[in-house]
Image (spheres, coloured by chain):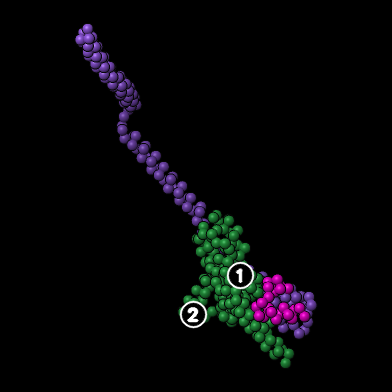
Amino acid sequence: MELANIDKLLESYFEGNTSLKEEMELGAFFNSNKVPAHLEMYRPMFKSFSEAREVQSTRELKLPIAKPKSTFMVWSIAASIAIVLGVGSLFFFQNTGLTAEQEEALMAYNQAKETMLLLSENLNKGASKITYLEEFEQGTSAINIINQFNETRNKILK
Amino acid sequence: MKQKEFLETVLPIKDKLYRLARRLLVSSEEAEDAVQEVFLKLWKGRDKMKEYSNPEAFAVTMTKNYCLDRLKSKQASNLKIVHSNYQHSDNLQKKVELNDEVALVFKVMDTLPEKQRMVMQLRDIEQFEFHEISEMLDINETAIRVNLSRARKTVREELLKKYNYGIS
């Protein structure tokens, strides 16, 4: 780069008016070996900037492992509920204290009860149908009244 | 946001945040603490992070605020900042041999007012655009240029003093 241009850039650099691209040009120039004596004093400035850019953090980042912990919690809660239910139901069914024969009898009884219930339900349905029949009969009797009415009317007309 | 996705977003800016924290807090230990704290906060608010147009600028703002708070509480409790970075071997010193003038530039930078220090850090070292710095520090571009110009001139003055002293 031309020296005149460098002088100009430097001037606007110290006024805070250079663009990033121009500042990078200045940095490249002052970090090269072509710096003339009268500009030597600016070298440490640009050198320190490029050196400071190389500094790195050495400590490793520590983040709380939140996600896996919470899923573990959910699973452990679910598992404990399942265990409580399992153990509880085991005790519940054991406490009926029935022998195999009695249980069989109970089952048969329950089955019989169910069929009876089903039967009575259907019977009720049938019975409700019968009420319809009654209404029909009422209807026919009403028709009979109309017939009688017609008969008497005919008599009058004659 | 899963941890992997989060780290992919924030890890590339870790060093930038560290360097800014170190510029402000001077101690590298405290800067590492600051970065850890800022990342913890970012991690806690990770669901909101997608809403920000520029997560990098947001992280820089958080770092700046954290460090300024630290400095304030330090002043309040009258604690002296330990300037340990220049005497002890540090990863910077290990990597490159600093000559006196470069060390002087860093020393001068650490004496600058906080605003100038931050602006110089973000522009001359991290090479952010003015509009980005404006978003990060919440100050307008004219104020940024003014602070930057002052910081650069102060460094130049100190270098000039040293240079003239060396010659005469």
Question: Color of chain A here?
Answer: purple
The residue singled out by tag 2 in the image is B75
User: Is residue A47 rendered to the left or right of residue B114?
Assistant: right
- Vertical relation: A17 (above or below) A64: below
Q: How many marks?
A: 2
B55 vs A77, nearest the viewer: B55
Q: Specify the subunit that label 1 lies on.
A: B
Foreground tag (1 vs 2): 1
Name which quarter of the figure residue A61 lies in: bottom right
* Amino acid, disc 2: Gln
Q: Residue most toward the front?
A: A158
> Which one is earlier in the sequence, the residue at label 1 or at label 2?
2
Q: Which mark is residue A147?
A: none
Query: What segment carries the magenta color?
Result: A4-25
Name which quarter of the figure residue B150 lies in: bottom right
Residue A104 image position (x, y, % from top left):
34, 24
Q: Which mark is residue B131?
A: 1
User: Is residue A2 rendered to the left or right of residue A62?
Assistant: right
- Vertical relation: A54 (above or below) A6: above
Quick one: quadrant of the C terminus of chain B? bottom right
Discs 1 and 2 share one subunit = yes
Residue B116 image position (x, y, % from top left):
59, 78
B27 vs B139, nearest the viewer: B139
Q: Residue at x 39, y 39 (%)?
A: A86
Mark pair 1, 2: CA separation:
31 Å
Q: Residue at x 58, y 66 (%)?
A: B57
Residue B69 image position (x, y, % from top left):
50, 74
Q: Can residue A96 be seen in the rendering of this structure?
A: yes
Q: Can residue B36 be seen in the rendering of this structure?
A: no
Q: Which chain is green?
A: B
Quick one: quadrant of the N terminus of chain B? bottom right
Q: Residue most toward the bottom?
A: B168
